[in-house]
Amino acid sequence: MNFKNQTVDLTRPVVMGIINTTPDSFSDGGRFNSVDAAIDRCAAMVQAGAAFIDVGGESTRPGAPLVSFDEELERVIPVIEALSDRFDTVVSVDTSKPQVMRQAVSAGAALINDVRALQEPGALDAAAECNVPVCLMHMQGAPETMQNAPSYNDVISDVQAFLSARIAACSDAGIHKSNIILDPGFGFGKTLAHNYQLLAGLGRLQEMGYPLLVGMSRKSMVGNVLNNSINERLAGSLALATIAAQAGAQIIRVHDVQETVDVIAIVNAYRDYTLKGE
Ligand SMILES: Nc1nc2[nH]c(SCCc3ccc(S(N)(=O)=O)cc3)nc2c(=O)[nH]1
């Protein structure tokens, strides 16, 4: 798949590293307020084998407050400029705001990662004009309230229907299907059961014919099983990365890049040595 001037081989799972620039960011306590810290973190992730680096300026964890346009720009643009100047890895911008998309892509971002699947006013046109791949993620409700009472008829079918509708909207806006990545949105308006049903149903989402991005790293679907805190969820996150990679997810969005790259290498070896000549 092409991301501006870079091609990423998505025939095998690859890793997306996370750079949070928000003070209340979900798991790294906002220590990446400074560009330099983000650059150091990114260097380590690229060294460890990250194919993507996701830069977000709005925390979308449950209950997170909305962030202003100016604040979000201030957080992400300097980091995206610095990272795209220094590293070959594909920089992704985690935003729902059209103007942040435009400025981030001008600053070097080559993937738009929108947890609101381009539903904000002007987002479809902005993404079409940016002409870079976009990840469409499912969310039920909004971060402030999404975990209050998540409910579905059938979570897989409902997520599939939502993503199909967003793909159609993208097509109407001139976004080609070859520029679309899908994401079920683990933890975005889902109970623990819904999250594990979605994981089990990745094969059905795969059948839609688009690359899948999954983000489960350090989330409550680990914490609620292990009853532990965010900084103790590496093993659980690696277990989920293994399951997702085997189920065919192409992009695994994580905080712990080296460990996940190693886990995926084992999954690939297992696949290479057992399915040879299939
Ligand atoms: N494409 C894509 N982008 C993402 N950006 C984020 S930020 C994480 C926000 C969060 C934190 C914690 C919980 S919880 N209650 O499950 O622990 C939910 C959401 N995530 C994703 C994801 O998955 N895909």
Image (cartoon, grey):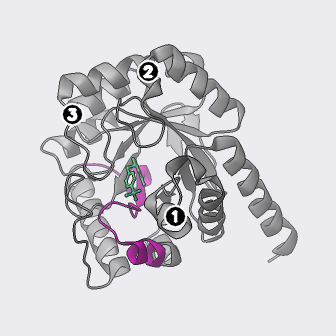
- Measured along the vertical axis of the image, is residue 188 above or below residue 42? below
Residue 155 position, x and y percent, is 34, 78
What residue is shown at x 47% (from left), y 26% (from top)?
Answer: 31
* Residue at which label 2 appears: 79
Q: CA distance from mark 3 to mark 1?
A: 30 Å
Question: Mark number for residue 227?
Answer: 1
The location of residue 270, given as percent across then percent down, is 81, 67
Q: Which residues are magenta?
A: 174-198
For disc 3, the neighbor class at 10 Å (few under 14, some 14 to 19, many from 20) is: some
Q: Is residue 173 magenta?
A: no
What secondary structure is found at the residue carrying circle 3? loop
Q: Is residue 175 left or right of residue 278?
A: left
Disc 1: residue Cβ within 8 A of ligand 1's nearest atom? no
Question: Above or below — where is 70 with respect to 225?
Answer: above
Residue under pointer 3: 67
Nearer the observer: mark 3 or 1; the answer is: 1
Rendered image quadrant of residue 138: bottom left
Does any portion of residue 224 appear in the rendered image?
yes
